[in-house]
Amino acid sequence: MAPRSIKGIGSKRASRLGSSLILGLLLVFSLLAAGLVEAQKPAVELIVRGDDLGMTHSANEAFELAFKRGIITCGGLIVPSPWFEDAVRRCLEHQDWSVGIHLCVNAEWKNYRWRPVLPYDQVLSLVDRNGFFYPTAEAFLAAGPKVEEVEKELRAQIELALSFGLKPDYLDTHMDSLETKEEFRQVVKKLAREYDLPVSGWCGEDREFFDIYNVVPEEKEKVLIEKLKSAKPGLYLLVVHPGLDTPEERALVDQNPDGLKNVYRYRSAEVRAITSPKVKKVISQRKIRLLNYRQLKAEGRAVVR
């Protein structure tokens, strides 16, 4: 048999090498494409907002626990509330906390009331005869609140927070009084634009899906896990009210007609739910993105509408 030429052998080797190279490149491109598709998949994004920071000492303690060990991403501060200064101190010590101003025109707790930031005789349409905020939205509206006084008080709340050195990331509203009339909503929108702050709930978030407010304490963790497992891609808002089981919190009685009884049980249960290892495991497994309004604004997605 005639010996194969060196030239022929080299050509075949080069051909095999070329085929291998092409196959390798195709494999690399396939992997890159798969990774790109994975990266482009719509994500489940969740903002976990805590309300009523500053309301009680126990609430402040609960917020600190929730920020350190839980999934909470931001917290709304009630500026006129009794434990405001303690809350401010904690916020300034933890600059990574995303804090908002929880604009307030109500004080709903029996025997535990607060007045406006402004001298109450400057906003008489917002207060009762003793100078306290009204406990319910119905009482607030029945008093005939003047729009100009609402704006004056809300602006004073933001300015007081700023004067303490806080740099809020967003605004939101306490209870539903400021959501009841379009003229009040316009005041909130005006202040949001003036201070360049997004309004929580007005940035395209789905707030209804993750609502666990009325879920009984024993079921909060379970229901939250179920919602985390079933959530479809989108931007969601979970609102919680951190609190602890303490004598201070046990003394709270909500004067709203539909107010929760033994509210401390609900608030402490929410803390347990948002610090639960099981909850955090589901978030990790599903690659749910937790974010706050500071991040949302940085990404150009926190638009005041």
Image (tube, rainbow, N blue to C red):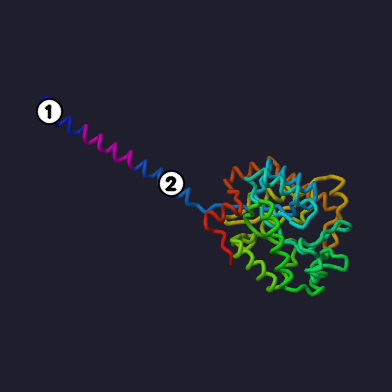
* Residue 16 lies in the magenta-colored region: yes
Give SS at disc 1: loop
| Residue 293 visible in the current orientation | yes
Residue wearing tag 1: 5
Name the residue tied to disc 2: 34
Asked if residue 233 lies left or right of residue 180, the reply is left
Please say if 187 is above or below 169.
below
* Nearer the observer, 7 or 220: 220
Tell me which residue sits at (81%, 70%) in the image: 124
Q: Residue at x 83, y 45 (%)?
A: 245
Q: Is residue 227 left or right of residue 267?
A: left
Residue 55 location in percent, x, y? 78, 53
Q: Quadrant of residue 260?
A: bottom right
Decide: is 112 above or below 177: above
Per the model, the C-alpha gap separating discs 2 and 1 is 44 Å
Q: Residues within 10 Å of mark 2 (few under 14, many from 20)?
A: few
Q: Residue at x 83, y 53 (%)?
A: 263
Is 68 rendered above or below residue 206?
Answer: above
Q: Residue 21 in the image: x percent, y percent?
A: 29, 37
Tell me the tag on residue 193: none
Say whether marks 2 and 1 touch (CB < 8 Å): no
Mark 2 or 1, nearer chain start = 1
Q: Is residue 114 rendered magenta in the image? A: no
SS assignment at label 2: helix
| Magenta stretch in the rendered image | 13-25
| Amino acid type at mark 2 | Ala
